[in-house]
Image (cartoon, helix red, strand yellow):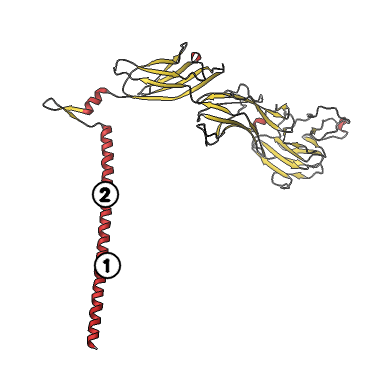
Amino acid sequence: MIAFMLTLIAAFNAGAFVDSDKESKPEKNTLNKTTVEYYQKDNITNQIPYFDNRFRLDANLDEITLIFYRKSGSTPIILIRPDGSKIRVNQFDYEKVQWFDDSTFDMIKIKNPMPGPWQAVGDILPNSQILVVSDVKIEVEPLPEMAFSGETLKVVGKLFNGDDAIESPYFKNVVNLDVNFYSTNKAEHENFGADAIKVTSFRDDGRGLDEYANDNKFTGEFILDFAPGEWQPVYLVKLPMTTRELRQTPILLYKTPVELSVVRSEDDEKPHQLVVSIDPSHVDPNSLVFQGKFTYPDRQTEPFSIMEESGESRTATITNTEPGIYRVNVSVFGKTITGREFRLVVPEFSFNVEDNDTLLTLNSSVDADGTYTTIETAEELLIKAEREKAEALLLKQQAQEKEEQETIIIIVAGNSIIILIAVILFFTLRRKKLKSK
């Protein structure tokens, strides 16, 4: 029976004893194939004294991976085999040992380890527990079957060692938990042929949405700001020497169910009207509330909200402060038609307000006789300049082509004349030669 133990989380504490096999054992201090044991530091049990940081490996182990946590910046540990020989970070059998050293831990994979008591020497962190890991995996609650582009999702993942949750506070420093989305590449969806997208990494550091640090709950939040279509969530547990993958059922990502538009005011004294249109295909319009801000041309901002209204359309007024570009950013909170709560961000909406008086001044001027003469706007002048530039470039190219053609004609004519002169000279010389005979 091949016993594969992916990781041994170890920062050793004298007197600690861990046995992952909860079944009774026929003999005291006898280990089965899947256990690694620290000796108890009492000379009565062990008959002879042992040093700290000792552990025993069973004779039937085909492969084991050990993780030793040490003080930050300290040198890698040294492993001492039962026969007294040493394994160092730069001195080991590459066919049997793999070693990954970081500033805070060493991960060592050993094939067919020597059975018996081993010892680790180094600045190993105290007050931690041994964990015998047989298979690292992550469990994440399934995502909703349907979601919306721009929606924010929060997910919580938990690491397991086989069927047991991993409780070591140091383990989060070893693993990376990434969230990726892969297109199912169905031709009927907009995301057909789209590349894979990494949206976030889980954290267990007590920051952001993570409630408690080191509680073995890895929390991640991400915005689905990519093309609508069918996507498959894929969670990756990455360790220095191995990777584990969790693939969930694909979800359908729909277009944002909210669209923004504006009715511009023609009167400088009256506000513009923001119109919020709701698509009721997948959401309950009466459940939606809106929170956002207006950004005016002078970059001043004003918050706004739309609450406790019903129907498939909402409106809000935007103060008409001055000509220029106005921007609208909106977050939406509501329920789907199935009752699921959601929150999403609508893509930024912007519109431009022109100055009517400026337009009149730019477009016309009054002559002495009272008539209006049209004057081109800056935009028209720019377009005209670009057109004239293009025409000038075309004329230049045509002139170059004409010049090249004339050059070719001159060369051909010159060569023809030279050939003609050569022929005339040939026959003239030949005739003189015949007469002389």
x and y percentages locating residue 233 in the rendered image: 59, 30
- Name the residue furthest top: 308
Side (left or right) of 171 relative to 435: right
The crowd level at tag 2 (other Cα within 10 Å; few <14, some 14-19, many 20+) is: few
x and y percentages locating residue 46 in the rendered image: 86, 33
- The one nearer the camera, 242 or 129, is 242
- The one nearer the camera, 146 or 40, is 146
The crowd level at tag 1 (other Cα within 10 Å; few <14, some 14-19, many 20+) is: few
Kind of element beneath mark 1: helix
Residue 415's label in the rendered image is 1
Residue located beneath label 2 in the image:
396
Task: Decide: is 297 above or below 88.
Answer: above
Identify residue type, mark 2: Lys
Using the rendered view, name the quadrant where residue 4 is placed.
top right
Q: Earlier in the sequence, mark 1 or mark 2?
A: 2
Kind of element beneath mark 2: helix
Could you tell me if residue 170 is visible in this image? no
Question: Could you tell me which quadrant the C terminus lies in?
Answer: bottom left
The residue located at (70%, 32%) in the rendering is 136
x and y percentages locating residue 414 in the rendered image: 25, 66
Side (left or right) of 149 relative to 376: right
The residue located at (63%, 22%) in the rendering is 212
Identify residue type, mark 1: Asn
Question: Could you tell me which quadrant the N terminus lies in?
Answer: top right
Viewer-nearest of labels 1 and 2?
Answer: 1
x and y percentages locating residue 111 in the rendered image: 75, 43
Could you tell me if residue 68 is visible in this image? yes
Using the rendered view, name the quadrant where residue 6 is placed.
top right
Mark 1 vs mark 2, CA separation in Å: 28 Å
